Image (cartoon, rainbow, N blue to C red):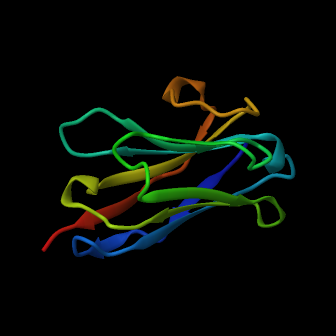
Amino acid sequence: QVQLVESGGGRVQPGDSLRLSCAASGRTFSTYAMGWFRQAPGKEREFVATISWSGGSTGYADSVEGRFTISRDNAKNTVYLQMNSLKPEDTAVYYCAASRTSYGSSYSQDYDYWGQGTQVTVSS
């Protein structure tokens, strides 16, 4: 069992930046690929970013490419999502997730553990 706890969400204005953190329990964190997903009201959960177990490979949704950066610090059992140039359409509940696959994935069904989510609101 792995527990994931997100933090860092809040309300910001368009163009602002925000960094989300996800703290993971367990000594096997470094063997998991990690991902970030988001879900807005009335919409399906969508992929945001993923990172391999080593941190050497990352992937992003087209909608956030160039604006968001995923990273991890295995020594701290933590994964981050740096969000820059935020837009109103980025408003959603953001979830971090862990996958037993070392390479990561853009599919939610490939993830075994999920955090409780943190709200990000971007508005003027």
Q: Residue furthest front?
A: 66
Q: Residue furthest left?
A: 124
Counting from the top left corner in percent of width and height, residue 17 is at: 38, 73
Instruction: Answer with left or right where residue 23 lies relative to residue 82.
Output: right
Instruction: Answer with left or right where residue 90 lies relative to residue 76.
Output: left
Tell which of 115 and 98 is nearer to you: 98
Counting from the top left corner in percent of width and height, residue 30 is at: 82, 48
Q: Residue furthest right?
A: 27
Counting from the top left corner in percent of width and height, residue 47 is at: 43, 37
Tell which of 105 and 58 is nearer to you: 58
Name which quarter of the figure residue 63 lies in.
Answer: top left
Q: Give the residue at x 65% y 34%.
A: 104
Q: Quadrant of the C terminus?
A: bottom left
Q: Give the residue at x 47% y 49%.
A: 95
Instruction: Answer with left or right where residue 71 lies relative to residue 68.
Output: right
Q: Quadrant of the N terminus?
A: top right
Task: Check the image and report above or below for 112 versus 77.
Answer: above
Counting from the top left corner in percent of width and height, residue 8 is at: 47, 71
Task: Check the image and report above or below for 110 versus 58.
Answer: above
Q: Give the residue at x 74% y 55%.
A: 25
Name which quarter of the figure residue 62 lies in.
Answer: top left
Instruction: Answer with left or right where residue 54 lies relative to residue 11.
Output: right
Number of numbered labels in the structure image? 0
Q: Give the residue at x 40% y 67%.
A: 84
